[in-house]
Amino acid sequence: MKSPFLRRFRILISALVFICFFLVFVDFRYIIPGDYINYLLYLQFIPSAMKFFDLRTIAAGGFIIIMILTLLTGRTYCSFLCPLGIGQDIFSRIGGRIRRKFRRYGFKKPFTIIRYSLLAATLIVTMVWGVYLLTLLDPYSIFGRFMTYFAKPVIIVINNFLAGILGKFDIFTLSHITVKGYQLLVYLIPASFFVLIGILSLTKGRLYCNMICPVGTLLGLLSKISLLRIKFDKSACTRCGRCAIGCKSSCIDFLQYHVDVTRCVDCFNCINICPDKALSYGLVNLKKKEQKTDESRRKFVAGSVLLMLGLPHLVKGQDKKAPVPTKVSTVKENKTSPVCPPGGVSIADLNKDCTACSLCITACPNGVLQPALFQYGIAGMMQPVMDYHKSFCTYNCTACTEICPTYALHPLVLEAKKLTQLGKANFIKDNCIVKTEKTACGACSEACPTKAVYMIPYEGNLVIPEVNNEICIGCGHCEFACPTTPYKAIFVDGNPVHQVAKKPENEQSEIKTPVEFPF
């Protein structure tokens, strides 16, 4: 199903559940029947499980229903029935109202070791020493403690305030109730958990559920084999990244079309936010994935084996080795402007529209995009900037332009990206080892995808680089490939406003950029 009805249904049910539990805990007049409370508690995982193992009766087996529900639908319990989980959603929404970036989550790797260690510790401690750790981390118990020690007294104070006002008009519908306090240390645990979960919810969404909560971890394990789950339609997905940004569980890796079902709480926000209707909730595809045996994968496996056998020169497929400088370079690179990513149009446009969400940095397959410190000035801190000492911009890649949620990086078709001049290459002859060490190199020329860097005769049999800036696109292949340190013999000076390069005569549009340079 792709209908926004799913999210509305979830919000309706969870709102009703939250209100019911809220009324149960703040009922200072004790007018809610006990049977009603038992119905609510029947589908609370830890209370139900503890009651079942105490009474040994299926009538107390609500937790079994929850596990069956998880096997069928995934972690719907966490979104629909858990009062603490629903409370976290409320805090997340408040956080989004306070600061918009709090609602921009993005994919994050799971805290696997922490999650399963806490679950194992909880089970072991419960079996050996008792249920204290279990009840300490139980989401229902955490919610109940907070409502009892903090929310209920506030409601009583409000009641007493209104009773005092109405009493002046001889209206005695409300009566004064004495607020009963507890020892100061009693408030320490619920206050600590409230601060911890509150901050995590405001800023990180469902991080508590997916890192600490033992119930969430256990249900996450069961959800690995659930029949219904969130799925990608790869043919419809444009990898805009909105689903990942809106996922409060940070479990959607849209670049790999993958949803981590162990952390997904089936809130259906991703389905609602997807502009391409590429996400749906339905039966899992049980067909086995086709096993790929393409040439690149065979090479990777073969290369890995050769590396383990200590034959790296065979992996490269050549006998040539990159020249290693024996002298340090002395002429500093005179960069007048940083290089902003393709699609940025200009540094000014990027600084104006970029929210520094780091989505493009995460998506960059080569890691050439780095968070800026002072390259753009203070106003541009943490925005993406090209660092060609660390890597290079792959010639056939437009990943960053495809996923920017604010259009600070405008979408570029591949052919347009290949002609977008991010900067111009500058050659420093006094740093080049061809001159300083009379050694043949050519790494920059070998790496250049447009052949804007080419070799010309120098001395004797030696050749030295020269740059044609008309066809240079400022991709940084040459700078990254240059072996000189600490300063490169060739570097890219950024264009404050991106320009259009001329199309190279012998364009290599199908270039497969090597991982290692220069040979």
Image (cartoon, rainbow, N blue to C red):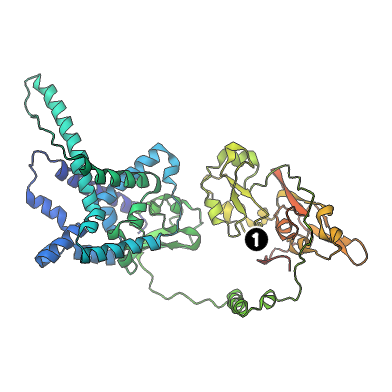
Residue at screen point 45% across, 56% down: 108
Q: Is residue 31 left or right of residue 6?
A: left
Instruction: Name which quarter of the figure residue 3 lies in.
Output: bottom left
Q: Against 463, is 469 above or below?
A: above
Q: Against 67, is 367 above or below?
A: above
- Give coordinates of residue 284: x percent, y percent: 36, 68
Q: Which residue type carries mark 1?
A: Asn
The answer to whether one can see residue 420 in this image is yes
Q: Quadrant of the N terminus?
A: bottom left
Q: Nearer the viewer, residue 354 or 290?
A: 354
Q: Which element is circle 1 on?
A: loop
The answer to whether one can see residue 266 in this image is no
Q: Is residue 36 left or right of residue 371?
A: left
Residue extending farthest top? 168
Instruction: Name which quarter of the figure residue 349 lies in.
Output: top right
- Give coordinates of residue 517: x percent, y percent: 71, 65
Residue at screen point 91% across, 67% down: 461
Q: Is residue 54 left or right of residue 485?
A: left
Disc 1 designates what residue? 396
- Give coordinates of residue 295: x percent, y percent: 61, 76
Residue at screen point 24% across, 57% down: 133
